[in-house]
Structure formats: structure tokens, C-alpha cells
Image (tube, grey):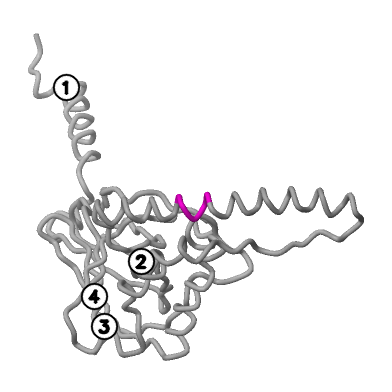
């Protein structure tokens, strides 16, 4: 039997095995790079509310510029007005594509070295259980009230058609006692008043916490536009259906804090 160390077949197998092992490892230039995650956002954000509760949409880019794979577990937004106590808005949804109309729930994701994650994200606080029950009951009462009025209108339209009278149209307005609980909740919760705001965006990946601060302004006219959304609650709009002839979100320019 010949010397195994002079057998080129043996060395070919060793080289092939080493090549397979190396192919499973990160590129050499990444071996000594520490973990790092870069965060950027678009120059504008979109602001709205659900019965007064603030909703923010922020277009976020996360780039893994480090040397190891990261698990991004959470992204949060903190917003404060004129130096007051900040309100934390956790991420709730992610739009998969720029032209999507609905978002999906955010779930932690893996980012390999060089990966870039770019999505429009929705941030708002979750409603407490008792608040959520009250809201669902108020929404259900509103829907039922408007539905009953629509049925009454249909019956009246049939009668009017028989006597050759033009039918009446337009949006159906709910009764005041049905709207009152929603308007009261809106007034208690609404906080997007005119002023100077600071927004802190934070991404968390293991022991990596990357964050940036941004400033923006809500003018009195902006506040008025946001308040006027509540005027449509009497029609059920923004509560259980979305208007397509009006904008729900206010576009607000942001600038990176010094």
C-alpha cells in the first residue's frame, strides 16, 4: 500500500472538503467586523389617528453593515411634543410592497451581512381590553343605526317611486346618541395638537440598539385637518369604512435632529 500522503486523490478530497467548509462561512472580509445596523427613514412621515389615538406611518430602511447575522426583534417610535413626556408607539404593521393598501403584522426577521430591509411601517399603541370592548360596542351600534336608516331609505324610495317622486340620496347620518360616545372618546384621546415634535426611531436586534431622532412640526392647519376626520364619524367613515374621496393621513416633513 502506497504512502497516503503522496496520494493526490487523498489531497483532492481534503481540498474539496475544506472548500465546502469555507463556502459555509461568511466571506473573509467579514470575519473581523463587529455587528452593526444602520437606520434611515424617508424625509416625510404620515400622521393620522383612530378616534384620537395617534397613528404614524414611517418608511424605514435597516441595513446590516456588520459582520454577523442579526435578528431584528422590534422597532419602536417615541413621540414627544415641546419636550413633554414621550408616548411610545410600537410597530404594528408592515406594508410588503409600496403599492399595498393593507399591511401585515410585523414579526421579527433575520438580517444577514449586507441585507437591506425597506418597508413602510405603521406605529400605534394597542387599545386596552376594556377600551377595545367599548370601542367595538360603539362601532357596532353605529353600524346598526346607519344600516337601519339605509333600509328605511330604501323603503321610502320604493314608495316615492310609485308616486313618481325622485328618491333622496347622499350619505346616511347616524343619530346623535350613537355618535356621542365616539366623539367623547376622540376628545379625550386626541393629542396631535399644533407644536414642535421630536420622534425617536429605535430598532432592536439582540444587544444592538440603533436609534435616531427627528424633528417635525404640526401646524394649526394640520391639527384642524386631523380634527376634521372626526366630522365623518356620523357617517361611519373611518370607523368601519374608509372614505376614498378624502385623505386620512397627513404628510409631514421630518428633519434629522442635530
Query: Is mark 3 in CB contact (under 8 Å) with mark 4?
Result: yes
Residue at image mark 3: 198
The reply to whether discs 2 and 3 touch (Cβ–Cβ < 8 Å) is no
Q: Quadrant of residue 50?
A: bottom left
State the residue position of label 4. 200
Q: Nearer the viewer, mark 3 or mark 1?
A: 3
Mark 1 or 2, nearer chain start: 1
Comes first in the chain, label 3 or label 1: 1
Comparing labels 2 and 4, the label whose residue is closer to the camera? 4
Residue 158 percent location from the top left of the image: 81, 48
For disc 2, the marked residue is 60
Query: Disc 3 versus disc 4: distance between alpha carbons?
Result: 7 Å
Q: Secondary structure at mark 3?
A: strand
Disc 2 or 3, which lies upstream in sequence? 2
For image coordinates 35% across by 58% down, the residue present is 117
On screen, 122 above or below 40?
above
**Are the residues flagged by discs 2 and 4 in contact, CB closer than 8 Å?**
no
Q: Circle 1: is it few (<14), some (14-19), or many (20+) Cα within 10 Å? A: few
Of circles 4 and 1, the one toward us is 4
In the rendered image, the residue lying farthest to the right is 164
Cα distance in 3D space between marks 2 and 4: 12 Å
| Mark 2 or 3, closer to the camera | 3
Start-end of magenta stretch: 140-144
* Predominant SS of the magenta segment: helix
* 141 drawn magenta: yes
Circles 4 and 1: CB atoms closer than 8 Å: no
- In the image shown, does 100 or 175 lie closer to the viewer? 175
Amino acid at each position: 500500500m502506497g504512502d497516503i500522503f503522496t496520494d493526490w486523490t487523498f489531497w483532492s478530497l481534503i481540498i474539496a472538503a475544506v472548500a465546502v467548509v469555507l463556502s459555509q462561512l461568511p466571506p473573509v472580509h467579514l470575519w473581523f467586523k463587529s455587528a452593526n445596523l444602520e437606520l434611515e427613514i424617508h424625509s416625510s412621515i404620515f400622521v393620522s389617528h383612530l378616534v384620537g389615538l395617534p397613528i404614524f406611518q414611517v418608511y424605514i430602511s435597516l441595513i446590516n453593515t456588520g459582520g454577523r447575522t442579526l435578528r431584528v426583534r422590534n422597532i419602536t417610535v417615541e413621540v414627544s411634543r415641546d419636550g413633554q413626556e414621550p408616548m411610545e408607539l410600537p410597530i404594528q404593521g408592515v406594508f410588503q410592497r409600496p403599492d399595498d393598501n393593507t399591511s401585515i403584522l410585523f414579526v421579527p426577521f433575520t438580517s444577514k451581512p449586507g441585507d437591506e430591509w425597506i418597508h413602510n411601517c405603521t406605529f400605534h399603541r394597542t387599545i386596552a381590553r376594556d377600551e377595545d370592548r367599548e370601542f367595538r360596542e360603539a362601532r357596532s351600534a353605529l353600524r346598526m343605526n346607519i344600516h337601519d336608516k339605509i333600509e328605511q331609505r330604501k323603503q321610502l324610495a320604493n314608495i316615492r317611486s310609485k308616486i313618481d317622486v325622485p328618491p333622496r340620496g347622499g350619505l346616511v347620518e347616524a343619530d346623535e346618541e350613537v355618535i356621542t360616545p365616539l366623539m367623547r372618546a376622540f376628545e379625550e384621546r386626541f393629542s396631535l395638537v399644533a407644536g414642535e415634535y421630536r420622534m425617536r426611531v429605535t430598532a432592536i436586534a439582540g444587544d444592538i440598539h440603533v436609534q435616531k431622532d427627528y424633528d417635525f412640526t404640526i401646524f394649526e392647519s394640520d391639527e384642524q385637518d386631523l380634527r376634521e376626520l372626526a366630522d365623518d364619524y356620523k357617517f361611519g367613515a373611518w370607523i368601519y369604512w374608509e372614505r376614498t374621496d378624502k385623505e386620512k393621513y397627513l404628510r409631514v416633513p421630518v428633519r434629522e435632529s442635530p
